[in-house]
Image (spheres, helix red, strand yellow):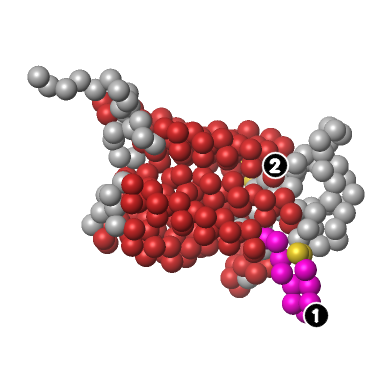
Amino acid sequence: MYPILFQIGHFELRSYGVIVALAFFVGLWLATKEAERKGLDRSHVQDFVAYALLGGIIGARLYYVVFSQPDYFWQNPWAVLAVWQGGIGVIGSLLGGLVAALWYTRRKNISFLRFADTLAPAIALGQTIGQFACLLNGDSYGRPTELPWAITYTNPHSLAPLNIPLHPVEIYEILGYFLVFLLVWKTRKLYRADGLSFLTYIAGYGVARFFVEFFRGQPAIFAWNIPAAQVFSIVLILSSVAGFYLLRAQAMDPVGSRKTKS
């Protein structure tokens, strides 16, 4: 693929950074629009961005350190800070962002569930776009396969093994996360209880991520050779089910079926 878009001297413009930046700004734009629709001050979304980035980076790095190469980082603790050398986990970034959102909404005295609903479509769309960065970079590559739709990386700057047909797991994720985005987007106006759009997102993401991990080349391992992402996916799915159960009295607002009092 194309990890480096172009190079001038020692300067390299990498596709990963460009696409991640694009995903970030598209997500910010969509979250701002959704805040306006829900009657929230758009400045809350804009102000939260810095805290979301910080929490996301810390969470993503800790996830990678704990589940990918714990022995190496135990022996080289300062390497934990070397984020520029690669090594982050999306689930960790979500958990870090969640902690940041809980802190921010408490500080600003606004509803966490309503704020989470506002961000849910943007997160799902941002993840969809962000997977193109992994695809071009050869990051989070798939298992070897002989299937006709396998992809083979030949660029020496790619992170994936070269000249080996691999499952296009990045494309699987693009398709899966886009379906999650559509689900959240299409159902967000049906709910009358705060938090249900966010629960829909984490349920959809959990399901998509659980199945994608069967095709990943080198998944982070939790224990007993079980991919950590699948463990956390199950936790997300069960959490969303519990959340829907707790809010079941207000779960759905069947549009057009509300009765007016006479």
For the residue marked with disc 1, what is the amino acid? Gly
Q: Write down the residue under mark 1.
A: 9
Which stretch is magenta? 6-16
Of the numbered discs 1 and 2, the one sitting upstream in the chain is: 1
Q: Label 2 is placed on what type of residue?
A: Ile
Which quadrant does the C terminus fall into? Answer: top left
Q: Quadrant of residue 257?
A: top left
Q: Residue at x 26, y 26 (%)?
A: 249
**Quadrant that contains the N terminus:** bottom right
Q: Does the magenta-highlighted stretch encompass residue 11?
A: yes
Prevailing secondary structure class for the magenta stretch in the rendered image: strand
Left or right side of 26 for 242: left
**Viewer-closest of 239 and 68:** 239
Q: CA–CA distance between discs 1 and 2?
A: 32 Å
Q: Which residue is mark 2?
A: 171
Q: Secondary structure at mark 1?
A: loop
- Measured as percent of width and height from the top left, residue 60 is found at 55, 57
Q: Where is residue 78? Give x, y as percent.
A: 61, 73
Q: Which percent across, then down, holds residue 65?
A: 60, 59
* Residue located 39% across and 63% down the image: 46
Neighbor class of circle 2 (other Cα within 10 Å; few <14, some 14-19, many 20+) is some
Residue drawn at point x = 56 percent, y = 35 percent: 179
Left or right, 140 with respect to 120, comes to right
**Residue 235 in view (yes/no):** no
Query: From this viewpoint, is residue 201 visible?
Result: yes
Q: Secondary structure at mark 2?
A: helix
**Along the line of sight, which residue is nearer the eye, 151 or 42?**
42
**Depth check, front residue: 113 or 29:** 29
